[in-house]
Image (spheres, grey):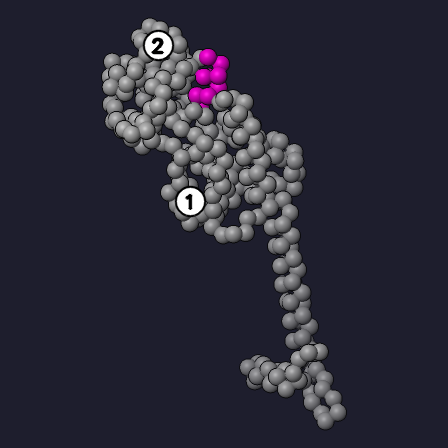
Amino acid sequence: MVGRDATIISRRISRLEKKLGVRLLSRTTSKVALTEVGNQYYQRVRRILEDLSSAGEEASDLASKPQGLLRISVPVTFGRQWVAPALPGFLAKHPQIRVDAAFSDRFVDLVAEGFDVVIRLGALKDSTNTATWIAPSETALFASPGYLRAHGVPSHPEDLSSHACLGFTSHASWPEWILVSKDSQRAIKPSGPMTADNSEALLAAAIEGLGIVLTPDWLAGPAVKSGSLVRILQGWQGVANGGIHAVMPPGRLVPAKTRVFVEHISTTIRTAWSRDLS
């Protein structure tokens, strides 16, 4: 009780006794002692306070050390191509972490569904969450060298009307392609031999010379580097840009398991970006 006013303490104990309807202390002119009920109450409260202190220490320890279950959500194709290859190295580096990865193209509610981090492509719409920028990305037009030799190279978006175009039906602007340049925008209605709701299927068709595809550079990049695809209409790009982000629940305190994952995935993707997309 050092540093405490005895009168204040006595008053608070009296209020507690009145609230409980029992005497906690036996008072005489020479000393104050716990009653039997008071001793039981004290022992019970002490255990509760010790448990509370222990719980606080465990929570702090869990948040400060990379450990526990990490729930992540990633887009299917991007996750398969860029995130999945990074997971073994991450888990080897942090053996106290377990990863539960959901590969889905739907827009998940990371708070309601209990995710620690989600990878989002394009411009972010929800400003209440915490986001970390990972890498740039833009959507552009690509075709195989064989297709361009056979059908010519379009020099303007309007030229696409006379070309075979491969349509991604899950794109927000479909059945149009919205193309933008530095000072202009065009809405094109592409037509061609194939549409699909899977971007990898369309990329494979473009590589085989079936037509022109509008797709993200992170997907087409390796094929461009190998010479299987060529970017066309330089200076024009799709509107689905904004980069790659790791998005976390709102709040300033980011658990260590989430922080080290974002650091690892960012470094891994940027390294692969410079190797495969440049």
CA–CA distance between discs 1 and 2? Answer: 43 Å
Q: Is residue 241 magenta?
A: no
Of the two numbered discs 1 and 2 in the rendering, the one whose residue sits closer to the viewer: 2
Viewer-proximal residue among 4 and 153: 153
**Residue holding disc 2:** 148
Name which residue lies at 60% across and 85% down: 11
Q: Residue 208's image quarter? A: top left
Name which residue lies at 72% across and 94% down: 29
Whether residue 99 appears in this view of the structure is no
Magenta-drawn segment: 219-227
* Residue type pointed to by label 1: Asp
Q: Residue 199's image quarter? A: top left
Q: What x and y, as percent, mark residue 197?
A: 35, 25
**Residue holding disc 1:** 109
Q: Tag 2, which secondary structure?
A: helix
* Residue type pointed to by label 2: Leu
Q: Tag 1, which secondary structure?
A: loop
